[in-house]
Image (tube, rainbow, N blue to C red):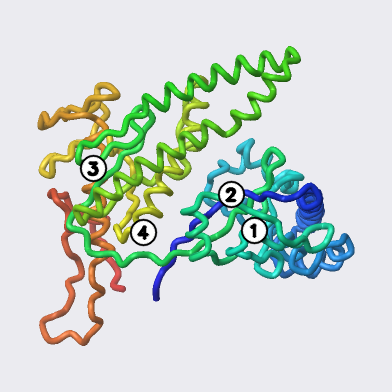
């Protein structure tokens, strides 16, 4: 069975004034209906899609929604609550007494008036040759809406589009975000691994010693923050030109960071593919909830695209047929990578940039050492995952499995006996 990678392609709509008015009336209608469904689901404690459909489908039809848009509204609400409950179970919102968790569960999920709305092929059809679409709106079916995009993405969209498409609106401009499915390339057995350590000062450091520094992005973000502060001050004083400049600069910083992550991930995947190695990454999900920071550090960590770089590396590796794994990040920057040493301690890292093992004296750049530890853990994890399943055949004579076997570790461990009181024997099982 072939596996697929899901990618998103965004195109820009070029509607006429009449078509734009129909699209502008569609998103508020769908999201107002979604808010009503969400309030009812929260009030009655019904979050399953089928049960919600029985409760609200007739009401949604009475509001003017067609059959498929009504089902998509119900599905959007059900998926939102499923995601919320999954985050709570995973502990991403803290414990039961956490303010974030109490705030999340104390009120129904709300949708913005311009939040994206999903459409399927029954509600939205594509005419790729003419570069137009036909879509359901609050004012009926609207046809011949032109769209445009980057030529390479349009070609990719025509070849691989499959599934739902979201209608989104940003600053009065309408976009379609389409789902494309591409089959994964066959993965070969890796000869080795490239460990990647992510950070703020160095965006990505590999076990080969390649360092993708983040100083340029830091300077860019500081400059953008200063410009935003100046423009917001002028806007508060009534400057219309400052308001226009703020609108033009919206999302510019996020696009710049995405571009940097694309370039970094593309280079790492190309190196891994050329040398027939896999890519290993630290599993950093939930890091913002686990790490305690000073006030001046919070904005930097919260806006840093750790997760995005990991996603880019993963999907590019899958498309290129490069194995990809995530490993435990615990103590990767404090552990000595020398196989016969492995000493772990906070004193091994006297400062942010330097690593020096207090036991064997092995030293080097701290981020490179962390990437080397990620590579070693990937080798162990892949050997365990790719281990062949033993044949559950009939054992012959003399093949009885001993009751206890020594642990297969790299260093000797002390075996402790279970404590028993004198004069008593352990009951047989």
Q: Distance between the residues labelled 3 and 1?
A: 38 Å
**Residue located beneath label 1 in the image:** 79
Total tally of numbered discs in the picture: 4
Residue 43 in sight in this render: no
Question: What is the x, y in percent for residue 117?
Answer: 69, 55
The residue pinned by badge 2 equals: 88
**Cα distance between the residues tagged 2 and 3:** 31 Å
Q: Earlier in the sequence, mark 2 or mark 4?
A: 2
Residue 418 x, y percent position in the rendering: 25, 56
384 displayed left or right of 284 = left
Check disc 3 and report the residue beneath it: 373
* Numbered tag placed on residue 318 in the rendering: 4
Q: Could you tell me which residue is drawn at 70 percent across and 66 percent down?
A: 49
Choose between 88 and 134: the one closer to the eye. 134
Q: Nearer the viewer, mark 2 or mark 4?
A: 4
Toward the right, the furthest residue is: 62
Q: Picture coordinates of residue 325 (x, y %)?
A: 33, 54
**Mark closest to the chain's N terminus, 1 or 2:** 1
Q: Which of marks 2 and 3 is nearer the N terminus?
A: 2
Q: Which of marks 4 and 1 is nearer the N terminus?
A: 1
Question: Along the line of sight, which residue is nearer the eye, 346 or 401?
Answer: 346
When the figure is inspected, residue 8 is found, relative to residue 49, above or below; the finding is above
Badge 3 or badge 1: first in the primary sequence: 1
Q: Which of marks 3 and 4 is nearer the N terminus?
A: 4
Q: Which residue lies furthest to the front in this view?
A: 130
- Quadrant the N terminus occupies: bottom left
């Amino acid at each position: 069975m072939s596996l697929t990678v899901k990618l998103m392609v965004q195109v820009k709509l070029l509607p006429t004034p009449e078509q734009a008015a129909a699209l502008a009336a569609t998103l508020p209608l769908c999201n107002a209906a979604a808010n009503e469904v969400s309030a009812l689901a929260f009030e009655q404690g019904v979050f399953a899609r089928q049960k919600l459909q029985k409760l609200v489908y007739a009401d949604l039809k009475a509001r003017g929604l067609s059959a498929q848009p009504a089902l998509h509204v119900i599905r959007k609400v059900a998926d939102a609550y499923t995601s919320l409950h999954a985050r709570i179970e995973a502990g991403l919102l803290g414990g039961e007494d956490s303010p974030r968790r109490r705030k999340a569960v104390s009120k129904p999920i709300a949708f913005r008036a311009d939040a994206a709305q999903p459409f399927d092929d029954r509600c939205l059809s594509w005419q790729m040759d003419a570069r137009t679409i036909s879509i359901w709106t609050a004012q009926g079916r609207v046809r011949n809406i032109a769209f445009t995009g980057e030529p390479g993405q349009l070609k990719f969209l025509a070849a691989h589009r499959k599934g739902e498409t979201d209608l989104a609106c940003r600053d009065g401009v309408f976009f379609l975000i389409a789902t494309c499915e591409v089959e994964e390339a066959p993965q070969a057995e890796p000869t080795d691994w490239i460990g990647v350590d992510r950070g703020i000062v160095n965006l990505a450091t590999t076990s080969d010693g390649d360092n993708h520094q983040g100083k340029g992005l830091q300077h860019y973000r500081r400059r953008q923050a200063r410009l935003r502060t100046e423009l917001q001050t002028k806007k508060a004083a009534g400057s219309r030109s400052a308001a226009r400049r703020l609108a033009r600069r919206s999302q510019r910083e996020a696009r710049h960071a995405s571009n940097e992550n694309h370039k970094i991930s593309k280079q790492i995947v190309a190196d891994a593919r050329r040398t027939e190695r896999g890519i290993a990454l630290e599993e950093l999900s939930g890091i913002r909830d686990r790490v305690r920071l000073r006030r001046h550090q919070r904005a930097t960590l919260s806006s840093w695209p750790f997760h995005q770089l990991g996603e880019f590396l993963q999907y590019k590796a899958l498309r290129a047929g490069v194995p990809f794994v995530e490993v435990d990040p615990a103590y990767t920057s404090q552990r000595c990578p020398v196989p016969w040493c492995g000493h772990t301690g906070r004193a091994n890292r006297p400062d942010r940039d330097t690593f020096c093992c207090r036991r064997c004296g092995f030293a080097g750049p701290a981020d490179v050492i962390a990437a080397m530890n990620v590579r070693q853990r990937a080798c162990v994890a892949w050997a365990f995952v790719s281990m062949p399943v033993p044949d559950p055949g009939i054992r012959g004579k003399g093949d009885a499995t001993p009751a206890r076997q020594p642990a297969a570790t790299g260093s000797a461990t002390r075996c402790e006996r279970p404590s028993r009181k004198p004069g008593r024997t352990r009951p047989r099982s």
